[in-house]
Each structure stands twice: as structure tokens, then as C-alpha cells.
Image (cartoon, helix red, strand yellow):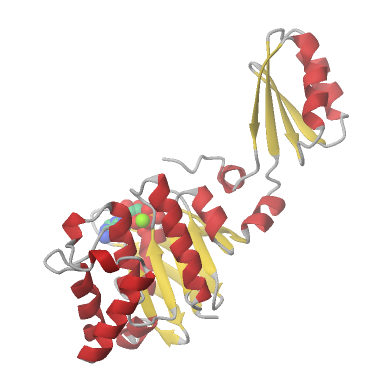
Amino acid sequence: MIVEIEALTKVYEGKQQVKAVDGIDLSVQAGEIFGLLGPNGAGKTTTISIATTRTMPTSGTVRIAGVDVVQHPAEARRLIGVVPQYNTLDRSLTIYENIYYHCRYFGFSHGQARERSDELLTQFLLAERRKAYPSQLSGGLAQRVQIARAIAHRPAVLFLDEPSAGLDPQSRLAMWNAVQDLRKEGITVVLTTHYMEEADSLSDRVAIVDHGRMLALGSPQKLKETFGAQTVIHLALRHLDQVESLASGLRNQSGVQNVEVVSDGVRVFSTSSEGLLQELVHAASPHGLRDIAIAEPSLETVFIQLTGRDLRE
Ligand SMILES: Nc1ncnc2c1ncn2[C@@H]1O[C@H](COP(=O)(O)OP(=O)(O)O)[C@@H](O)[C@H]1O
Ligand SMILES: [Mg+2]
């Protein structure tokens, strides 16, 4: 295990005590892309800040490749790369210099730093912009520079805090590709996000966190199976007088797990909507079928089942 978090807690002292992390245990395997998924305030940034030596834990331990981050912070920092949620590029330096000085800080000679910076600028398709300053870059490009800089000293683990916050959809997809390429280089990635699509499409495993606690852990597929996230088919009807009998009829359909009567019709929970839709339309049409909405199973529906709340703020 390349990252081991044990019984981690963090209480922020102040006028009001805030228990930001409330007993988190988790391990990340080498080579994994691991997602911490949770709403704002869940404790994701605090967890990452402790793992990356920016914040002291109240109790518990974090080890990176066996190195305790509190006892040996300098050693730990060589093993990790960090892309914080906000742009931390040095605005007085060019893109090239941002990466170059990062390498120098980690003990590279002038020649090694120059070679590594050139290599990264090529790899991240930034070579033409090497002399640009951070203020001249779009959000997507700045994010790419931040990732290139974070891995410049060849860390074993890269921590990305909300990597797509503020990015347009196209830059987000480019960032996802860049993260997937890191895996090919053998870099382990730990990312936080409150976008369930991002956790779902990028992560090998996801920890769902809320109020500083971990509610569930597993591959996105496994989480959806375990927490019974189902396809939800909402049938809106014009005539609601015999909706109960429609509902009980639908419960006997194969593929249907459950049917709820709602204010404007029925909600059908199914493990697979394959072939079912036609049956539903047929059964509902005498009741004046007005509209159909289909929600596929997702980490969003898993989160709702775990907490009764929506992931979005
Ligand atoms: N420096 C701080 N001082 C006091 N409270 C903080 C501080 N940083 C975060 N918090 C609080 O800790 C909780 C977790 O925050 P954070 O780790 O930023 O969550 P997330 O990244 O999941 O949004 C929140 O209630 C937040 O307000
Ligand atoms: Mg955060």
C-alpha cells in the first residue's frame, strides 16, 4: 500500500470547534487512481492537506510508501506531488521557470532541471508556451502546468484537490486524459471531487466521505451494486385515479424491483431498463402517459441512498 491512512482525525480549534476529519481509515494501492468523493465541507481538502504535510492531524497517522508524514515530512514531500484546488503557480515566472525551479528545489542540478522541464513541456503539449506567464494561460492550461510541475521530481503519488473545479467541459476531459496517462507512468493518483461523474469515470476505487467520515469504499461498479443503485423510470400520468392498480400491476413485471406512487404518477425502480420501457409505456398508456424520465444508476444515486441527501450544494 502506497498510502496508508489510519484513524485520522482533525479538529480545527477556534470559537467553534470543527471536526473536519472524524476517523478516516483507508489505503491506496500503488498504481491506483483513487477518488475521495463528497460534498463541500466533507473533509476532503483537510485529509489531503494532512497527507501532503500542509496540516497537522489531531490524531492518527498517514504513511506514504511507509514514511510517516508527521515524523518525516521532508522525506514524505519527495514522495508526493500536489496540485491544490487553487492555482499556485508563481506569477512572476514563466511556465518553464515554474517547472525548472521546482526541480532545483528538489535537488536537481541545473542540467537535470533543464532536461526534465523540457521533457515535461513536451509531454504536456506546452512546449510552445514555455515562455508564457501564468496570467496568460486559460484555466485548463494552467491546470496542465500545475500537474507537470507537481510530477517534475518524479513523486510516487500525486494528490489532486478538486482538479476540475472551474474548468470548462473540454478542459475537464483533457485533464481526465492527462490523469489517466499518469497511471501509465506508474504514478499513483489520489484525487478529491464533488463531481460524481468525475469520480465514476476516473477512479479505480472511490471512498464516499461526508462529515469527516467514510461512508463507503469500493470500485464505482461495486458501490452501485452494493448500494442497490437502480435505474429509476419516472412515468408522469394525466389520469391519477387508478394509479394504485397500475403500480401493483407493474410490480409483477420482470426486471422491476419496486414501484412508488408519486404525486404525478409512478416511479419504477429497475435493475435493467432493457426491454422494460416498451412494457411500461404499454401499461401506462391507458392512464394518459404524459412524460417519461430515466435516471441511470450513478454514484449520485448511491450517495442519496447512503445519506438521504443530494451531492450538489
Ligand atoms: N482552516 C480551517 N479552520 C477552521 N475550519 C476549517 C478550516 N479548513 C476547513 N475547515 C472546516 O472543516 C470542514 C471540512 O473542510 P474541508 O476539508 O475543506 O472539506 P472539503 O474539501 O470536503 O470541502 C468544513 O466544515 C470547513 O468549514
Ligand atoms: Mg475542498
Where the C terminus falls, by quadrant? Answer: top left
Q: Residue at x 35, y 49 (%)?
A: 167
Q: Is residue 79 visible?
A: yes
Residue 57 visible (yes or no): no
Q: How many marks?
A: 0
Give the quarter of the figure containing the N terminus: bottom right
In the picture, residue 263 is in which quadrant?
top right
Relative image position of residue 26 (x, y in whole percent): 54, 70
- Viewer-side residue, 214 vs 103: 103
In the picture, measured across the screen, residue 213 lies left or right of residue 141, that is right
x and y, in percent, of residue 166 in the image: 33, 48
- Residue furthest out toward the left: 92
Identify which residue is drawn at 40% across, 69% down: 159
Q: Is residue 173 left or right of residue 110?
A: right
Relative to 38, is 294 above or below? above
Please state the quadrant of the image where ligand 1 appears: bottom left
Q: Is residue 77 left or right of residue 195?
A: left
Using the rendered view, name the quadrant where residue 278 is placed: top right
> Residue 292 location, x and y as percent?
66, 23
Q: Which residue sits at x=45%, y=50%?
A: 194
Q: Look at the picture and state if 300 lies above or below 180.
A: above
* Residue 174, horizontal then vertical, whole percent: 43, 56
Residue projecting furthest to the front: 128
Along the line of sight, the residue nearer the viewer: 178 or 21: 178
Q: Nearer the viewer, residue 184 or 297?
A: 184
Image height of 67 relative to 291, above or below: below
Q: Quadrant of residue 258?
A: top right
Q: Residue at x 31, y 82 (%)?
A: 116
